[in-house]
Image (tube, helix red, strand yellow):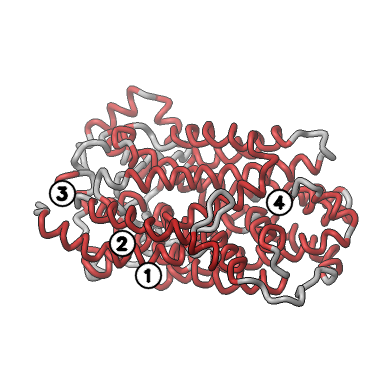
């Protein structure tokens, strides 16, 4: 395998001319670039990845460590955000522990298949997820999903930063403010994201064992208290509560579809798609289901355990609850709480990594700017919002996760119909040399129109705190369930019409 540092050096010239309509640009500019900017050579020799949205050519797709994708997604999901998402079932939707866990199990088994499938596209195309999406949404049309995805990714970073900051502050017995904790979490994640692909994969492989140890110890010292959690309320849950909670769960995982291939595009193209799918699917399902169920059990047991109830408080302090669960082991428990607080950095760092490419797709001229610059921009956006929203966590979490599931379902359906119906599942039908040429890409009118028209039915099916549609009021929130099939159905005739009038060269 080629030395990744040499690979970084070899693509400098490509990155600097990424906004052009061609994929290559002469090796001569590379040496001039590095010679004129010594700091750039230093960054590259440190292992900083500069490649942005330029597709990876076949000769550079040589990574055979396919198991790495398992650890990327496993570490991203094996954190206190997954734990906190499970608490929404009983706290927000009034579900019993049994009903909460059943919804978590079945809806995650279904929803996790979508992002796991999109992970298999990276090795075949060598493209970032949003760049590949240009072959459905077009050069300009993809800017709409890019904006929506940026909002979603920044939202995840805000939620993770709040949770990490809360946990750090709880260790200091509130001598440290949530704000300071949030800043510490954001800086650590920024450094990891700044370095790029190699360091991200290294960190994701190492970040989960301390988190696993922390949860095992928490179960060991506090597991007996979980038996006090009422598992069944005696009354069956309403369909509206079940479906609304399912909408939140779907929003948590389906949005990974819009960043999936960002982490697999360096893999050798000959790798089995089934292998990548299995690694990815398990890395979603296992940590998400386990931690969401644990979160639901812990928050339901808290009222019966005074120390847990005090840690959780009236503000819904997840970090305080976890610190209380670990408090019986003294100073070691505080250390483990710190490890739990740092668990969110694995998610934030990867999210910042994908944010970079969304900026470059949104504003194509930004592709001339090195990737890592946008890690700083993403942090600058998320950090102040995290601080402002820290004391309204549950409201923000519920509304955010419910809302982002709608557009992600639409997006995934359009890409799948394009690939399997119009391109017959053939990756060779994507002209890689056209990735940055508006004239050689689809107009995107069909995809945009299908997405917009889908919301004519999605909106009536919504049930949010700030809006309840006439259908959603009776059924619960079924917006994401409606979005996927409806967008796919609408895209079929609209794309046929687009192909009829557009002559691609």
Q: Do the residues labelled 2 and 1 touch (CB within 8 Å)?
A: yes
Q: Which residue is drawn at 24% across and 55% down?
A: 446
Residue position for label 1: 273
Tell me: 308 left or right of 41: right
Q: How many C-alpha atoms fall within 10 Å of the one at disc 4: few (<14), some, or many (≥20)?
A: many
Residue 303, by quadrant, is bottom right
Q: How crowded is mark 1: few (under 14 residues within 10 Å), some or many (20 or more)?
A: some
Residue that mark 3 sits on:
440
User: Residue 196 at x, y = what percent?
Assistant: 47, 43
Q: Which element type, helix, strand or loop, lies under badge 3?
A: helix
Q: Which residue is drawn at 31% across and 49% down?
A: 131
Crowding at dot 2, Cα within 10 Å, few <14 / some 14-19 / many 20+, comes out as many
Q: In this view, does 89 lie above or below 316?
A: below
Q: Where is residue 248 in the image (x, y as percent from the top left)?
A: 56, 59
Q: Which residue is drawn at 81% across and 68% down?
A: 229
Q: Which sits earlier in the primary sequence, circle 3 or circle 4?
A: 4
The residues bearing labels 4 and 1 have C-alpha atoms spaced at a distance of 33 Å
Q: Which of marks 3 and 4 is in front?
A: 3
Q: Mark 2 points at which residue?
A: 124
Residue 220 appears left or right of 116: right
Q: Tell whether label 1 touches label 4 (CB within 8 Å).
A: no
How far is disc 3 from disc 1 in space, using C-alphas?
28 Å
Sequence-first tag of 2 and 3 = 2
């Amino acid at each position: 395998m080629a030395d990744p540092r040499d690979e970084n050096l070899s693509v400098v010239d490509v990155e600097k001319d990424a906004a052009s309509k061609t994929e290559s640009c002469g090796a001569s500019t590379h040496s001039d670039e590095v010679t004129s900017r010594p700091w750039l050579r230093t960054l590259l020799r440190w292992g900083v990845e500069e490649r942005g949205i330029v597709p990876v050519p076949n000769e550079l797709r040589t990574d055979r460590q396919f198991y790495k994708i398992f650890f990327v997604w496993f570490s991203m999901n094996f954190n206190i955000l997954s734990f906190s998402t499970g608490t929404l079932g009983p706290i927000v939707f009034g579900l019993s522990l049994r009903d909460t866990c059943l919804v978590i199990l079945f809806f995650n088994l279904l929803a996790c298949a979508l992002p796991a499938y999109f992970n298999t596209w990276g090795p075949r195309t060598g493209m970032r997820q949003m760049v590949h999406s240009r072959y459905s949404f077009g050069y300009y049309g993809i800017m709409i999903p890019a904006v929506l995805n940026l909002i979603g990714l920044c939202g995840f970073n805000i939620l993770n930063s709040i949770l990490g900051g809360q946990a750090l502050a709880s260790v200091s017995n509130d001598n440290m403010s949530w704000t300071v904790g949030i800043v510490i979490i954001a800086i650590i994640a920024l450094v990891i994201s700044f370095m790029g692909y190699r360091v991200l994969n290294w960190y994701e492989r190492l970040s989960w064992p301390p988190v696993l140890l922390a949860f095992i110890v928490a179960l060991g010292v506090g597991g007996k208290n979980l038996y006090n959690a009422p598992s069944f309320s005696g009354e069956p849950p309403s369909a509206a509560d079940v479906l609304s909670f399912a909408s939140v769960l779907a929003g948590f995982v389906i949005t990974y579809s819009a960043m999936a291939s960002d982490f697999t595009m360096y893999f050798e193209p000959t790798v089995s798609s089934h292998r990548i799918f299995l690694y990815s699917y398990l890395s979603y399902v296992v940590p998400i289901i386990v931690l969401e169920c644990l979160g639901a059990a812990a928050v339901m047991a808290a009222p019966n355990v005074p120390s847990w109830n005090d840690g959780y408080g009236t503000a819904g302090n997840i970090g305080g609850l976890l610190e209380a669960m670990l408090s019986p082991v003294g100073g070691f428990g505080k250390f483990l709480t710190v490890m739990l607080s740092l668990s969110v950095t694995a998610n934030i760092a990867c999210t910042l990594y994908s944010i970079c490419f969304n900026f470059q797709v949104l504003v194509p001229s930004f592709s001339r700017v090195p990737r890592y610059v946008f890690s700083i921009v993403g942090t600058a956006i998320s950090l102040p919002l995290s601080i402002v929203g820290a004391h309204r966590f549950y409201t923000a979490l519920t509304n955010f996760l419910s809302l982002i599931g709608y557009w992600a379902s639409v997006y995934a359906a359009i890409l799948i119909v394009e690939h399997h119906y119009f391109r017959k599942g053939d990756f060779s039908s994507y002209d890689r040399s056209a990735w940055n040429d508006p004239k050689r890409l689809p107009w995107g009118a069909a995809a945009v129109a299908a997405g917009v028209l889908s919301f004519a039915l999605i909106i009536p099916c919504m049930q949010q705190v700030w809006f309840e549609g006439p259908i959603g009021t009776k059924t619960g929130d079924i917006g994401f369930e409606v979005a996927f099939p409806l967008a796919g159905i609408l895209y079929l005739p609209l794309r046929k019409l687009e192909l009829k009038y557009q002559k691609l060269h």
